[in-house]
Image (cartoon, rainbow, N blue to C red):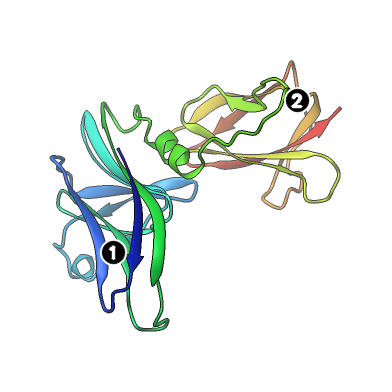
């Protein structure tokens, strides 16, 4: 369920939050961070927990319980707190320092509520977060359709596709494992690729060149591992 919001914010010394109390009980909430997620307590049993007003997330925060769960997703709101069974997303604030005009004026944003039956690992939460933040874009044309890149493991995300920074014409693909699992997968591409090589984040090779067979590149991941593949086209 999506909430597409437009608001003319003219408040001072106010904080606007949206609260989602749910029938899920857990002592920790799950917050997405870059290339993974982290669990944080949702109680105030310890002094440092009580002092934590809110925490950062990226695309979603979830509460899970055995065979069910729910999450609040956002497209640009990164402050959240979870107290007990309530997920509370910060939408707007009007502090007077350091910027007296922060968030003033017309704001447009989207947040969403998503629930599922089954385990967290079997849910589509990560895909839902990406679909909210990176909606499909279309343009008129007659070039046909093709899937440039895909993987055969649901817990591996093709996060970035870009030209190599050195202007060589190579293509760089960055992937990560999203659900804290060890997995063997295959990167599939419809491009005509001569060879591939594993690189560091600066796109420097760190392993031997791997030939590509019929557009398939085998890759293994450890939990939350990030890998960058550089493709040399024919």
Corner quadrant of residue 184: top right
| Res. 220 image quadrant | top right
Image location of residue 92, percent across then percent down: 33, 65
Q: Residue at x 34, y 29 (%)?
A: 123
Secondary structure state at the residue bearing disc 1: loop
Q: Looking at the rendering, in which quadrant would you find the C terminus?
A: top right
Q: Is residue 165 visible?
A: yes
Left or right: 2 in relation to 64: right
Q: Position of residue 174 (x, y in %)?
A: 63, 41
Between residue 231 and residue 223, name the one nearer to us: 231
14 with respect to 207 (left or right): left
In the rendered image, the vertical position of residue 162 relative to residue 5, given as above or below:
above
Instruction: Give residue 16's quadrant in the image.
Output: bottom left
Q: How many marks?
A: 2
Q: Earlier in the sequence, mark 2 or mark 1?
A: 1
Q: Position of residue 71 (x, y in %)?
A: 29, 42
Which one is nearer the viewer's eye here, 210 or 173? Answer: 173
Residue positioned 48% across, 50% down in the render: 34
Q: Which mark is residue 191?
A: 2
State the quadrant of the N terminus: top left
User: In this rendering, would 87 be left or right of 222?
Assistant: left
Residue 54, numbered circle: 1
SS class, disc 2? loop
The image position of residue 51, as x and y in percent, is 22, 71
């Amino acid at each position: 369920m999506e909430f597409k919001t437009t608001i003319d914010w003219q408040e001072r010394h106010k904080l606007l939050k949206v609260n989602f109390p749910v029938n899920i009980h857990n002592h920790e909430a799950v917050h997405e961070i870059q290339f993974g997620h982290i669990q944080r307590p949702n109680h105030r049993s310890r002094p440092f927990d009580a002092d934590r007003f809110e925490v950062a997330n990226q695309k979603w925060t979830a509460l899970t319980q055995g065979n069910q769960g729910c999450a609040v997703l956002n497209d640009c709101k990164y402050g959240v707190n979870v107290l007990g069974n309530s997920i509370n997303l910060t939408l707007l604030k009007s502090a007077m320092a350091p910027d007296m005009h922060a968030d003033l004026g017309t704001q447009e944003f989207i947040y969403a509520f998503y629930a599922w039956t089954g385990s967290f690992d079997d849910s589509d939460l990560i895909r839902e977060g990406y679909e909210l933040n990176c909606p499909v874009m279309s343009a008129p044309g007659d070039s046909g359709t093709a899937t440039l890149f895909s993987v055969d493991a649901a817990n591996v995300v093709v996060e970035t596709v870009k030209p190599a920074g050195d202007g060589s014409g190579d293509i760089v693909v960055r992937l990560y494992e999203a659900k804290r699992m060890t997995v063997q997968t295959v990167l599939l591409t419809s491009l005509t690729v001569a060879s591939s090589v594993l690189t560091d984040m600066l796109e420097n090779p760190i392993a031997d060149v791997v030939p590509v067979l019929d557009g398939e590149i085998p890759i293994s991941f450890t939990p939350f591992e990030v890998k960058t593949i550089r493709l040399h086209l024919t």
